[in-house]
Image (cartoon, coloured by chain):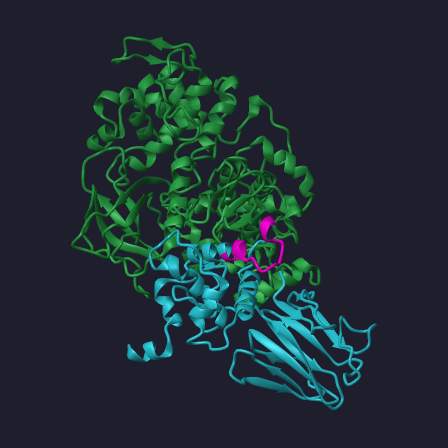
Amino acid sequence: MYSIIVVPPPTTEDEPDRTQLRLAPGERLAFGRAPGDNDLVVPHDGVSRRAGAITAQSTFWLLSNLSAHQTYVVENPEGAGEHIKVGPGRLDAPVPFEFSRIVLPAAGDLLAFDVWAPRHDHLRAEAGLDGDTTAPAFSVDRTKRYFSVLAALCEPRLRGEPHAALPTVDQVADRLRPNWPAASRTSVQWNIDYLAVKLRLKPGPETADTGPRLNGKKESLVSLALRFDLVREEDLVVLAAPAAREAR
Amino acid sequence: MTEPYAVQVPRGYRLGVWEVREPIATGAFGSVYEARRTDGGEELPRTAALKFLPTGTGTPRQLAHLRELIDREVELHRRLRRPRLIRMYDTLVVDDPDRPRLDGATVLVLEKAEGSLSALLASSPRPPAGPALLAQICEGLAQLHRAGWVHGDLKPANVLLMKDGSARLADFNMAAELEGTHAYTPAFSTPDYTPPELLWSEIGERGRRIRPSADVWAFGVLAHLLLTDSFPLPGGTPTARRDAAAAYARGTDELRLSPELPDGWREIVRQCLTRTHEDRIATDDLLRRVEAAAGTGRSPRLPRVLLPRRRSRRTTVLAATAATAAVAVLGYGISSWAGSGADGKGTAGAGTEKVTSATYGASELRTDKGVPVAYRRLIVDSAHDCVQPEVTPALIAALLKAESNFDPDLSDPTAGEEGEYGIARWTPSLLRWYIRADGVPATETPRPPLTPAESIPAVGRYLCFMEPRLEQTGLTGDRRVLLAAAYRTSTKVVNAAGGVPPKYRAYATRVAHYLKEYTPPGKT
């Protein structure tokens, strides 16, 4: 029933599997330098003993800045520089982004960790705001990168080949590069992992390993997306190159 | 009409034997229209509700999941027919290339209802018939769950109200058959009626795993809404209430039900809205408690409150008092009621005394006029299985008396083409249609001897079937006696004659005589 995921900063050199912390609405996570008082320890001398707290609230979250002098910045990594500032002493500042990176200034260094809000609600074309309407259990933001990744994965089957082989991660990266020059194998994989979290994919026994082979996960994502019309043929415009879009 | 219809069908449009009349309702995907039958066939009712679902290739939005939702609904209707579930008569496919938006649409021919519970709540919050409606809704759930299905989307809009004021469950797009303890449903839900364990639950390749207890949670929400005009969880928006449900399920918050909820119902709602699905009350236990609280007894008897037509003011008030009394009695301890509710008294007042066969249903069928004790239970229960108020225990008893003088061994092979047999003088080929409790015709024509246990419940079902088919106006005489006459002949003959046909006057007089004799004083 969690709505917020906190991804701790990398501690040692390469520790690929960082334990994500999940918060349900109303739950609170404190972070700071002191090991005893905090759920998330940030071991850096420039960080306050009790630096701040994250509170999950419905599908979004609140940031409290408990430090005396430092301003925290919450960036939207996909938002082209979009960010908010939370000054010292500010409690429960709401953060509207689906993806956030909290940046803590610490004696010349900038420490960052991520917070995801994968349960944001979005209006569906068919339904109103009425709580009485039978609504699909998924809500995706069609402007986000993960949606482009999902569209690219679904593309061959949406173009009329129901049993087409799914594109590889590299093929997806190539397909998306015109619109997203930084697309890489890693970033595409990251989005596929995030989609599995967001769409609450039940981990199957065969997909338990987190190696580079993501076939099971990809297959499940695509079948879910097509079954519930998360991606339709008209959504494939997100894959069109900017020039092609202007030509329309 | 405030929103455009998802599927627009012109008035007068012909589809098979049906002619489309007024639009009834529309959802996001499909639209429902009233339709009138244009042929003279007897098997189908004169009016029906046609549900159009755009499944054709020319429809503007191609929705892959729509096909799945329709298949679920059709599958359930094909497999299950229960008194508290709306009936499907047929499915059709529109073949009309000139209308690309309609061509290929799937059409479900459904029993026509008068309205929905959500419409009733919009016009009169806290309807006086609330407890009785809840008992019927719960009965529908119990019928579904016993058959091994989960509804998956119980809410006021999916409870339909029939002409006689009784409730039936509808909209089985999310319904799923249980596989062991779970069923798999599409990942759709209505936030206000979704149990906390399904909020943001994991979704596998086959959809989301759901248990019957999800329907029980939804019933708890619906009961609270119906009885207090408010949702059980606090919050002004569905989102706020969803968060409240999550907080409650996590144990950080308590359940605070409205103080307006009557005590008996408070306990019931609490047992539906438990934090975890394991603690939720089983559907059959729930049904017993709901029926005790509603004062409806074990059978789906409607209190007269629900029946606007041809009821005097006085009986309305009486029934309302009876229901209140039942709720008050509950305060003494619900545990003693859970058991006694199960042995099936027809009325609320007789709550705590033990009932023997000799006095079974005494408030509706006199005990001193020679109705054989052996058949009392069958007669009373058969009448209660019918929602039509005209079908009373006294009527069934009077009919049996007039037909056979309660002779279970009656055998009259010379009557008609195939003879008449048993306590109700059934013609075997007709009995075939009513012998089964689930409304499905038996595969073979029953052969005499016909036992009372087969004959009497079938009489209740047949009378119940005929009641709506007798003209509502223009017939002279007591409707119950007319029903008995129709049992002897047919509704068609009675309708054509405008009353009891001359040939059957003597029979009708006898039925009327015994009807009066068997009815306890003070009852109509």
Q: Is residue B516 visible?
A: no
**In the rendered image, which quarter is residue B163 located in?**
top left
Query: A40 or B243: which is nearer to us?
Result: A40
Q: Residue furthest right?
A: A36
Q: Is residue A126 left or right of residue A81?
A: left
The image position of residue B416, as x and y in percent, is 25, 14
Magenta segment includes B391? no
Which contiguous range is marked in magenta? A205-218
The image position of residue B229, as x and y in percent, is 52, 60
Residue shown at the point (43%, 76%) measured from the top left: A179
Residue shown at the point (42%, 69%) measured from the top left: A175
Magenta segment includes A214? yes
Name the tint of chain B in the rendering.
green
**Which part of the image, by quadrant, shows the N terminus of chain B?**
bottom left
> Which chain did the image draw in cyan?
A
Against B369, is A116 above or below?
Answer: below
Against B83, is A28 above or below?
Answer: below
